[in-house]
Image (tube, rainbow, N blue to C red):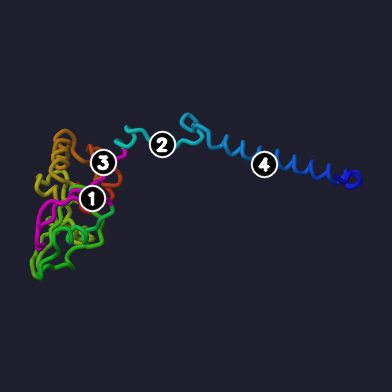
Amino acid sequence: MNFDFFKKNLNYILLLVLIVFIGYELYNSNNNYDDELLQIDTSDDKSFSYVDDKSENDIQIESSDENSQELYVHISGAVKNPGLYKMTPGSRIADAIDEAGGSLPDANLDAINLARKLNDEDKIYLPTVGEEVPSEINSTTSSPSSSGSLININSADKSTLTNIPGVGDKTADKIIDYREKTQFKSIEDIKNVDGIGDKKFENMKDFITT
């Protein structure tokens, strides 16, 4: 064995051994850290869990709210399938006609306002070309007040009241019940009837009088 070689290069040999030792320790340290990461139990660790803030009751309430916003409209006249239809909020008369199978060839589409938004309990009548329909029968015209034919909410019968936008059989009954106790002094008084708020009033105010 050449001891002279070791003596001359002792410092280098020690440095080499030290480097190897440090490298080995670092290698073991990294492996242990990886093992610890793999062994983490996240079953009780809320930081790794997804928390849904919506309870089952909240979901049911949201579903109920969506259902309450559904619109039911009655469409008749020159359409292929007259009847009662369920529409989504924001739908327009044109959408209701499509839902009813579309208009008949002799339908007078210019007689109604196809762009008007629908309200719950709307009654829509699509006349044929040349058919004369009193404005109080068809509540879908754009401005019935211009013809002077308005529905008197103090005297109109139930059938006529249902021609007001947003007024169905139930709401008509409520209007009649209310006016039997207190006459409407102004059209704004109709908002005192249960179920008629500001939004519904805005859609019917141009169709009614006292």
Q: Earlier in the sequence, mark 3 or mark 2?
A: 2
Q: Which residue is mark 3?
A: 191
Count of marks placed on residues? 4
Q: Depth-wise, is mark 1 or mark 4 nearer the camera?
A: 4
Q: Which residue is mark 4?
A: 27
Q: Amino acid at mark 2?
A: Asp
Q: Amino acid at mark 1?
A: Asn
Give the crowd class for mark 1: few <14, some 14-19, many >=20 residues within 10 Å.
many
Residue 52 is tagged as: 2
- Residue at mark 3 to residue at mark 2: CA–CA distance: 40 Å
Compare residues 173 and 61 and report the one nearer the observer. 61
| Magenta stretch bounds | 62-89
Q: Earlier in the sequence, mark 3 or mark 4?
A: 4
Q: Earlier in the sequence, mark 1 or mark 3?
A: 1
Q: Depth-wise, is mark 1 or mark 3 nearer the camera?
A: 1
Q: Which residue is mark 1?
A: 119
Compare residues 81 and 106 and report the one nearer the observer. 81
At x 22% / y 63%, what residue is drawn? 114
At x 85% / y 46%, what residue is drawn? 12
- Horizontal and vertical percent position of residue 180: 14, 35
Asked whether residue 181 is drawn in magenta, I would say no
Picture quadrant where residue 61 is located: top left
- Residue at mark 1 to residue at mark 3: CA–CA distance: 16 Å
- Quick check: 156 above or below 104? above
Q: Depth-wise, is mark 2 or mark 4 nearer the camera?
A: 4
